[in-house]
Amino acid sequence: MQQRIRRIAVNTGGGDAPGLNAVIRSIVLSSLRRGWEVLGIRKGYEGLFDTSKIMQLDRDSVRGITHLGGTILGTTNRNHPFEFPVQLPGEELKLVDRSDELVENFRRLKIDALIAIGGDGSMDIARRLGEKGLPIIGVPKTIDNDLSGTVVTFGFDTAVTVATEAIDRLHSTAEAHERVFVIEVMGRYAGWIALHSGTSSTADVVLIPEIPYQIEFVCDKIMDREARGRHFAIVVVAEGARPVDGEMVGKDQGAGREVLLGGIAERVALDIHERTGKETRTVVLGHLQRGGGPTTFDRLLALRFGAAAVRMVAEGKTNIMVALDPPTVLAVPLEVATERLKTVPLDCDTMLTARDLGICFGDGAWDG
Ligand code: F6P
C-alpha cells in the first residue's frame, strides 16, 4: 500500500546553478496544494546534521524567487556525508562516514521523502542514501550538463547564453586590435559549454576535454585566417581541455574535495603567441556563467522538474531522478544518472555542425 505523504524535505547541493530557486518554488507550491508540509534543508546535506539549519517553507518563503539566481537554501560542495571531513587538534584531516547519523535524523524528523537538487556528486550521495532506505528523488542541476539520463540539466542554457554574449562582445575588440582572444569557459570534464557557446558565437577554435589538442593545429588555423586577411581570432577553451602531451590545469583543494580546474587559457595564449607572434589576451569567464537569474528555458525546465518530482513522490516513486526526454519529463533510476559522466559524443550533431562550419578542435581534422 502506498504511504500517505505528510511532510517532505528539499535541499540544494554542489555548485549553484541558475534555476535552483524556480525548482524550490515549484516543489513548495505543488506540495502545499496536496496538503503536505515542506522543510528546507540548508546547505546541501549539512542541515540534516545540524537541525537548526532546517527551515519551514511556505507560500511566503517562495514568493518572487522564480527569476532569481543562487538558492534560498544555500548550498555547498563540501561535507560529503559519506566522507565528512573531521579535523581534530593535532591530527591529520580524517574523512568519516556520517551517513547513518543523517538517515537517523531524517527518520526522527518524520520526513516521508527528500527531493535532492544537485549535480553528479549530489546524485551519487542520493543513490547511496537511497540504498540505505532513505526515500529520495533527485532533480538534475548543473551548468556543466554532464549528468547522464537527462537530455539537459537546468543551468546549462544560462551558462551558454552568458558565455555566448561575452564572446560576441570580444569579437569587436579582437578585430580592432588584430589580437587573438582565448576565452576560458567552465564545464569541468565535459566540453558542452565550450562547444555550444563557441559554435553559437562563431569561434575559430574550440578546445574541449574530449579532444586533447595539438597547439600546431590551432596555430595553423590562426595563420590560415591571417593569410586570408582576417587578422584576429577567437579561441574558446573549456577549463578541462588539455594538450595531447600534457595534463589538465587545476588546483588540488585537499582531501575530500574535487580538483578546481582553471588556468588552461593562459597556457594556450602563451603557446599561440610564441608560435605565431600574434598578440594574445585571455578572458576567464568563471562564475559569471553561474551567477544571476536563469534564462526562460532554464526557468521553465526548473519549474517542470520541481512539479514532476512532487508528482513522483505522490505516486510513491523513490530512488529516481527526474529527467528531460523531450517532449516529456520522466523518471530514471539514480544508478543510470550516476553510472558515468555525460561527455560530448564526438559524432553528435552539434560537433558535426561545428566541423562543417570550419571550427578547429586542435586535432588536425580541420581542413580550412
Ligand atoms: O560544476 C559546476 C562548476 O561551475 C564547474 O564548471 C567548475 O569547474 C566548478 O563548478 C567550480 O567550482 P567552485 O564553485 O567550487 O569554484
Image (tube, rainbow, N blue to C red):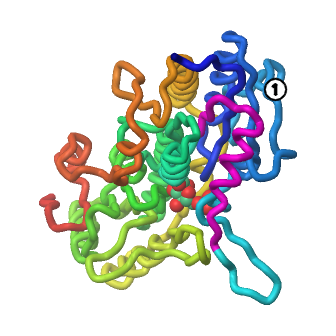
Residues 257 and 240: in front is 257
User: Magenta stretch: residue 76 in it?
Assistant: no
Image quadrant in which you'd find residue 86: bottom right
Q: Mark 1 points at which residue?
A: 61
Instruction: Give the x, y percent position of residue 336.
Output: 35, 43
Judge left or right: residue 43 versus residue 132.
Answer: right
Q: Which amino acid does label 1 sit on?
A: Ser
Q: Which residue is drawn at 66% across and 60% down?
A: 98
Judge left or right: residue 349 versus residue 74.
Answer: left
Above or below, 9 against 229 in this view is above
Q: Residue at x 50, y 70 (%)?
A: 281
Quadrant of picture, ligand 1: bottom right
Quadrant where the C terminus is found in the figure: bottom left
Above or below, 78 against 41 in this view is below
Instruction: Give the x, y percent position of residue 303.
Output: 57, 23
Judge left or right: residue 344 versus residue 122.
Answer: left
What range is drawn magenta here? 95-116
